[in-house]
Amino acid sequence: MYAPGDVRVENRDVPAIVEPADAIIRVAAACICGSDLWRYRGIEQLTGPAPMGHEYVGVVEQLGSAVTTLRPGDFVVGSFFASDNTCEICRAGYQTHCVNRRPGAATGAQSQLLRVPLADGTLVATPGQPDADLVPSLLAASDVLGTGWFAAVAAEAGPGKTVAVVGDGAVGLLGVLAARQLGAERIIAMSRHADRQKLAREYGATDIVEERGDAGVARIKELTNGLGAHSVIEAVGTQESMMQAIRATRAGGHVGYVGVAHDVSLPGEELFFSGVHLHGGPAPVRRFLPELIQLIWDRAIDPGKVFDLTLPLDRAADGYRAMDERTAIKVLLQP
């Protein structure tokens, strides 16, 4: 990406092993993330031409001498932070805060080849070579499924709970799927778009709320006997979405926030008296990958449905435009 709205596909140097813990993978599928749109729209500043993409699946081509858990030819799913998966923070399940983490280590995944640092801790091999129809779902596990899952876990979605989901992008929709898998009794998807409402219902939403802001909060309260939801997933990252999530949560309830925050400021006094728990941030996708890969492999879940447009890599600019204009939920790129 050269500038807001300016995406180009160009030849770059072939990546090579730099450190002993590296892997080089041939990307089988990549995609465009809603967070990529912050730069595309000029909300997040670019400091120069930036290789894009942090969601990827592919086949291992080369390994550094220190890699022990992978073999050339393995089909792997990676997460968007490189982590060693062995430090004390990783063992607690927060690999995005690994003491040796590499933020943005997979930047440039919208490509044919990708260098992945800390390969043993970052990549998870599938049980075998996947059928072609499983690849989109495995790709979703790389970020949006893992992020939606973390949001549901952080919001303590589970049996007997009412879960509200703020945001109907891929993460919000897969937050619906996660809440259903975790056993939530009632799931309220907040969406104004018919195609996204349909997918939300397929993933387990029991109710749809089209109102936003204070009106959306009032509707959630109306549906929950005036109390608010037990669990709320915030999957947007704006001031309005965060306050809508907090205000739609009952006292003692939990907000799992995973929308990348932009200019969000929380009013201390309101938060103090709300009785609401907040937990979230960049999702430790690596924590959930083994479980999510197995669910996909067993065809128990189909998160790949969030990809409603598939394009060759050389048409990446069209994909960005489609997501920016909301004519696509999420775009899969085929290198």
Image: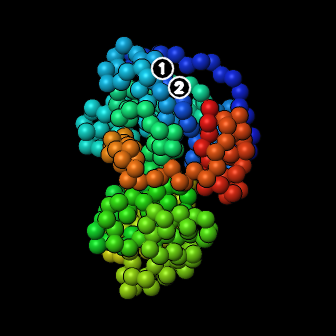
Q: Tell whether 96 sits left or right of 92.
A: right
Above/below status of 145 relative to 108: below
Label 1: how many residues lie within 10 Å, few (<14), some (14-19) or many (20+)?
some
Q: Position of residue 271 (x, y in %)?
A: 39, 69
Q: Which residue is mark 2?
A: 26
Count of numbered badges drawn on the protein: 2
- SS under mark 2: strand
Q: Amino acid at mark 2?
A: Arg
Q: Tell whether 270 sits left or right of 306.
A: left
Which quadrant of the rendered structure holds the N terminus?
A: top right
Q: Residue at x 25, y 43 (%)?
A: 92
Above/below status of 228 relative to 171: below
Which quadrant of the rendered structure holds the C terminus?
A: top right
Would you say the residues marked 1 and 2 are in contact, meaning their CB atoms lie under 8 Å apart? yes
Q: Tell whether 31 sits left or right of 283.
A: right
Above/below status of 237 relative to 60: below
Q: Amino acid at mark 1?
A: Glu
Asked whether the viewer can see residue 170, the reply is yes
Q: Which residue is mark 1?
A: 61
- SS under mark 1: strand
